[in-house]
Image (cartoon, rainbow, N blue to C red):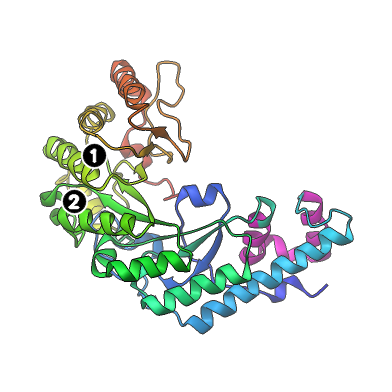
């Protein structure tokens, strides 16, 4: 067996929780965010570092390193009589031979990915579609050729970048093997989109979402309850429902707004220029938005920031990655919102108490 610590590849800072849940293989195709201006974010997940494209050659080297790590892990599995099954005994045997591996992100990522089935990969960082279409296709094809068992490849993308791609380009990217895009809608309200400097309009979001879907790429959008505070709550809820209805994405994922340190909205909050809505106000906003939805999407509360509780103290909504299927489970979600509205407000977690929680 070669020294596994001798292999490494770049890993970016974040991935969607649903990709963490499936321990997706992380392939970093670009570094950081090319926009860095959304006022609730400001590229903080990427430490405000400068955006960089990576060369196809460098990305392929990373994929080869991940493959080499996987091959070595498999070899140990066979040596131990597990016939390619990757389990804890395989892991502990490898680490006993090379103790520093438990701290090597590359090894840990590949081991977790393989032990959970090795079926999904996620392309990092914030906007992979900004790559030249031809280069991105080459990377995706190479990933699939190297790991033929992959069933799903996903990525983050900015709506503006998708909007700028032609439908033919998106179809080519889909044909190369990209299955799903995770996109931050945040709000469907143009005034709010401008205030947070999202750099994209509601109409462009709609066009981007429809184009991706037409190309056969699943669309998974993030929505931010509470982004408009109390004053813009109604317009945020209604216009977001309108945009979601127009797109009808496969997934709608709720990420309640929390001001993050080192962002302009956090500074406004500290200067007391920004009012954070209460958990009950946010539930009221959610009620308006959910009631207005005519989608056939899955609505997911798959993040700990959805801190609403039942009287019993349990979470109000399941944080499952597949969430609630609409329209079938719409009444159930509306019923849960009513239940949450009846609960003593102190039981819910307030956004202020989540400021220092990690992004993931
Ligand atoms: S595009 Fe995404 S990563 Fe970039 S600043 Fe906006 S929210 Fe942050």
Ligand 1 within 8 Å of the CB at mark 2: no
Quarter in which the N terminus is drawn: bottom right
Look at the numbered disc 2 and give the secondary structure of its residue.
helix
Q: Dot 1, crowdedness within 10 Å: few (<14), some or many (≥20)?
A: many
Q: Secondary structure at mark 1?
A: loop
Instruction: Please tell me whether residue 185 belongs to the stretch shown in magenta.
Output: no
Spot occupied by residue 357 in the image (x, y as percentages of width and height): 42, 45
Q: Answer with left or right where residue 276 lies relative to residue 319.
A: left
- Residue at 47% across, 62% down: 13
Residue 99 colored in magenta in the image: yes
Q: Quadrant of residue 81?
A: bottom right
Q: Is residue 224 left or right of residue 316?
A: left
Task: State the CA–CA distance, disc 1 to disc 2.
Answer: 15 Å
Badge number at residue 268? 2
At x 22% / y 52%, what residue is drawn? Answer: 265
Left or right: residue 155 compared with residue 197:
right
Please report whichever mark, 1 or 2, sits nearer to the chain's N-terminal start: 1
Magenta highlight range: 88-113
Q: Nearer the viewer, residue 28 or 136?
A: 136
Task: Give ligand 1's quarter of the image.
Answer: bottom left
Residue labelled with disc 1: 226
Label 2 crowding class (10 Å Cα cut-off): few <14, some 14-19, many 20+?
few
Whether residue 358 can be seen here = yes
**In this orientation, does residue 275 appear?**
no
User: Residue 255, labelled with which disc?
Assistant: none
């Amino acid at each position: 067996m070669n020294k596994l610590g001798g292999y490494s590849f770049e890993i970016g800072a974040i991935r969607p929780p649903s990709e963490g849940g499936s321990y997706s293989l992380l392939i970093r195709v670009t570094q950081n965010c090319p926009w860095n201006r959304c006022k609730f974010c400001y590229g903080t997940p990427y430490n405000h570092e400068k955006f960089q494209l990576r060369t196809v050659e460098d990305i392929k080297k990373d994929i080869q390193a991940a493959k080499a790590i996987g091959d070595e892990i498999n070899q140990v599995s066979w040596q131990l009589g597990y016939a390619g099954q990757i389990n804890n005994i395989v892991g502990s045997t490898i680490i006993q031979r090379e103790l520093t591996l438990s701290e090597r992100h590359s090894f840990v990522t590949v081991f977790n990915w393989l032990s959970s089935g090795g079926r999904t990969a996620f392309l990092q960082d914030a906007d992979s579609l900004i790559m030249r279409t031809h280069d991105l296709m080459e990377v995706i094809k190479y990933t699939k050729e190297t790991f033929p068992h992959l069933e799903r490849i996903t990525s983050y993308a900015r709506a503006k970048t998708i909007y700028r791609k032609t439908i033919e380009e998106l179809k080519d990217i889909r044909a190369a093997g990209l299955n799903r895009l995770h996109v931050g809608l945040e709000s469907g309200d143009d005034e709010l989109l401008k205030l947070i400097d999202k750099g994209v309009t509601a109409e462009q979001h709609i066009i981007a979402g429809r184009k991706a879907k037409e190309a056969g790429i699943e669309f998974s959008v993030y929505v931010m309850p509470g982004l408009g505070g109390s004053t813009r709550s109604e317009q945020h809820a209604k216009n977001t429902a309108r945009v979601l209805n127009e797109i009808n994405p496969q997934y709608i994922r709720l990420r309640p707004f929390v001001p993050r340190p080192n962002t302009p909205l956090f500074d406004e909050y500290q200067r007391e220029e920004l009012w954070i809505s209460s958990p009950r106000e946010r539930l009221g906003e959610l009620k308006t938005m959910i009631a207005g939805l005519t989608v056939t999407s899955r609505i997911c509360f798959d993040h700990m920031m959805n801190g609403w509780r039942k009287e019993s103290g349990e979470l109000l909504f399941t944080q499952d990655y597949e969430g609630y299927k609409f329209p079938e489970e719409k009444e159930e979600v509306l019923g849960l919102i009513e239940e949450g509205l009846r609960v003593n407000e102190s039981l819910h977690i307030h956004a202020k108490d989540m400021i220092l929680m990690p992004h993931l």
